[in-house]
Each structure stands twice: as structure tokens, then as C-alpha cells.
Image (spheres, rainbow, N blue to C red):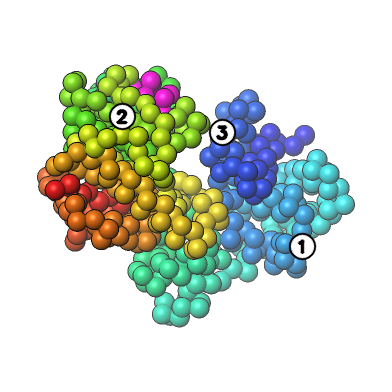
Amino acid sequence: MISPARVAAYEILTTVSAGDVDLATAVAVARAGVRDDRDRALAVEIATGVQRWRGALDHVIASFAKRSLDRLDPEIVEILRLSAYQLLHLTRVPASAVVDDAVDLARRAGKSSATGFVNAVLRAISRKRDALPLPPSPRQPGDRSAALEYLTVSLSHPRWLAARWYDRIGFDATEWWARFNNEPAPITLRANPARIAADELADRLAASGVIVRQSALVPGALIVEEGSAIRAVEEGICSVQDEASQLVGLLASRAAGARTLDACAAPGGKTVMIAATMPESGVLVAADVRDRRMRLLARTIAASGATNVRLVQADLLRPPPFRPAFDFVFVDAPCSGLGTLRRDPDIRWRRRESDLTSFAAAELTMLQHAAEAVAPGGRLMYGTCSSEPEENEGVSDAFLASTNRFVPVHARDVWPAIPDTVIDARGHLRTDPVRHGLEAFFAAIFQLQ
């Protein structure tokens, strides 16, 4: 019998590779069909690990198969990927069990003729696991070709992105960033202020065997070091939200006014943070465009207990259905997501360099439309979870160049206690793995004169 975890991992990977959904959605669907918690966890670990290390896995598989992967059936490619990942990264699993399950998976996928091939390739990988044909770290970091081969294959990042980072920040920082992206991200919590304070949450978690520590950079962020906080999340006393995202939410909370619009609000983590700091008489309008995202947003708001949030479905790529009545408008723009590759490793394979131009154009349009809803003297905030300048200061600068009605605002003028290390020379909030050990997020604030 094939391990349920491997079957689920195979289903996740084939769904993602088909381009139907992203990794997070595929995981959510597959988890629902697996009964045992340990099997669910292993399936997610395998599928996520394959996406992190896909570049290296594909190189190793092609080397031992002695043919390119595009000559193999897609089902066989995914079986080889998930099995090679287990052989190389989950060595607690007996190699014989991995190979046997791979052969059975090939039969289950209707590829019985490939069982001998699958068996041979995986046994060769298992035998040579200590001497894999992967490019070494370059002896001379300035050797661009060797550096990119190592970053692309051995550290499993798309060549175009590795090249951008190498040219912008150098080899050492790029290697650090790539290794950061290939490590599992910790679970970071934020207390639901309507239900519990952060220190009380930490005490309650500790009483149930969950050990957390306070983030060094983000007030109120609790990082899980031991145990599972699933029950606390299900009870609605806290939510999962990474540190960099919480920083952006805290900045938005301090910029918020009595009339606030969160224009791209789903899934709602930052919306809840803003709602918690607004006066009882204030009104927070939370908007998004798709039905599915609106349902997710509604669930998040309901779980938080916030009573001052009004939901509106709106497309920010079109002029907003609001008059200029808001003291604060927040555009947490849909972006490439290239700053979150540690948590969303499939993004690295779904994006192309050419996507950045279209993302930046859409983000600028959304920012310009959002500006139409800002009241005189009000503030406008733009944020992304992208690492790339085109989507960050590129959009911010293009917005300012398109209007003489808004001026930039230094983040410290909004949040005086914001950590110095996350503010760049122009007053933007900016985080990255190299300087902060956090995902790459960006935020800029403007004021209507």
C-alpha cells in the first residue's frame, strides 16, 4: 500500500504543475482528504520541499536519467521529484520504502511501462546521494557564470531572479537570500486584540505546551519555537501572520484615521490590525475584488470579532466607487510575491522576469485609483511583498511623478517608534532576509496636500 502522504504529495504537485492552482490552494484541498495528522504534515513537507529544491532535484534526476525532463511523462517527473526529495532530504525514511512507493505510484498513474526506469533512477540517486553532480560554490564570487550556475541549480532559484539579485547585491548576499528561501519558515502569531493581549496569549500557549518567543523587531509578534498553536488559532484568539507582514500592518494601523479604506484587504490580517486601533466611532471599509477573496476576508473579520469593519466588493483596477472621503487609504497591492519565496516556494517557478512590468503597471493603476478616495489632508499607503525595485520604489516614484497633489511621508513621522533598521534612506519601510532575517516587504506613505 502506498503511503497516504506520498499519494497526497503527488496529487498536490501534479495539480500545481498543471497550473490550475497555487501550492497553498493545492495543499488545502489535498489535506482535507488525508485522515492522519502525521500523514498530512508529511505530505505538506514533501510537496513544499519539492518546490523549494525543484531546480536541484531536476538537475540530479536528469543527470541519472541521462535525458532531459521534458522527454518524460509529467506524472513520472512528479513521482521522481517527490521521491528524490525524500531520498536526499528526509533520510529518516528508508530508501527502499521510497523507491517501492515510487514504483507503485507509477503503476497507479497508469505508467506501468516506466516502473523499471523509475526504480533504476531512484536507486542510482540513493547510491550517489553523497556525491551528487551539483555545481559547487564558485571559488571566485566574481565569476558571474559559475555563481549563477550554483545559485540556479544547487540553490534552486530561477536563473533570471538569481541574476538580478547577483547584479544588485552581490554573490554573498544573494547566496544568503537563496539559503534563507530554502529553509522552512517559522510559525509567527499575532494575538487577536479583541480577545487577548500578546503576553497573556504567550502564557496561555505555554500552559498548553506551546513555547513562543517575542520577535526582536515586531512588537506583539510571537514566534512558535515548540508545539502547535492550531487550537489557539481555531479558537480565534490569535492568527498566523509573518513578522514582515505584521510590520506593514502596524505601520498602517498608526496611519489609519477615523475613516479608513483598506482597498485590497483579503485575506484580512492587516485589516484586523487596523480595526483594533481605530476609535469605536471610526469606520473601516475593507474591499477586495474576487468572490473567493471576499469570502475569506469575511471569515477573517468574523473570527476577529471586529465590529467596525464594512465589506465592499470593488476592483481597484477601475475608478473606486467612493468619493474622496477617507482619512487613510491603504493599498496592499497584489504583486509578484517574490519577497515571500520562503513561505510560497512555488512562486519562484510561476513568475517570469517579464511579469514585473505588468505587475508594476497594474500596481500603479491601483494606487492612482485609490488616491481618488483620499480626503484633503489624508494619507495614502502603498505596500507589497515583492523584492524587486520595479514594484516598490519604481511604483512609488511613478505615482509621485504622475501627480503634484501628493507628497511623500517618512515612515517615522507616522510611527515614531518604528525600528530604525527597517527604514531605508528615503523613509520607506523595507525588510529583507539579509539585513533582517525576514521576508522582503515594502511600504511607502504619501499625503494629499
Hey, which residue is sitting farthest right in the picture?
113
Looking at the image, residue 236 sits to the left or right of residue 193; the answer is right
Specify the amino acid type for callout 3. Answer: Ala
Say which quarter of the image contains residue 274. top left
- Report which residue position mark 2 lands on: 285
- Quadrant into which the N terminus falls: top right
Main SS of the magenta part reads: helix
The answer for how far apart the CA atoms under marks 2 and 1 are is 52 Å
Say which quarter of the image contains residue 2. top right
For the residue labelled by badge 3, is the local secondary structure a helix, a strand or a loop? Answer: helix
Residue 324 visible here: yes
How far from the left and from the top, in percent, is residue 418? 17, 46
How far from the left and from the top, in percent, is residue 207? 33, 21
Looking at the image, residue 316 sits to the left or right of residue 380; the answer is right
Specify the amino acid type for callout 2. Answer: Val
For the residue labelled by badge 1, is the local secondary structure a helix, a strand or a loop? Answer: helix
- Report which residue position mark 3 lands on: 28
Count up the numbered dots: 3
The magenta stretch is: 297-304
The answer for how far apart the CA atoms under marks 3 and 2 are is 29 Å
Which numbered circle lies on residue 71?
1
Residue 269 visible here: no
Tell me whether circle 3 and circle 2 mark residues in contact (CB < 8 Å). Answer: no
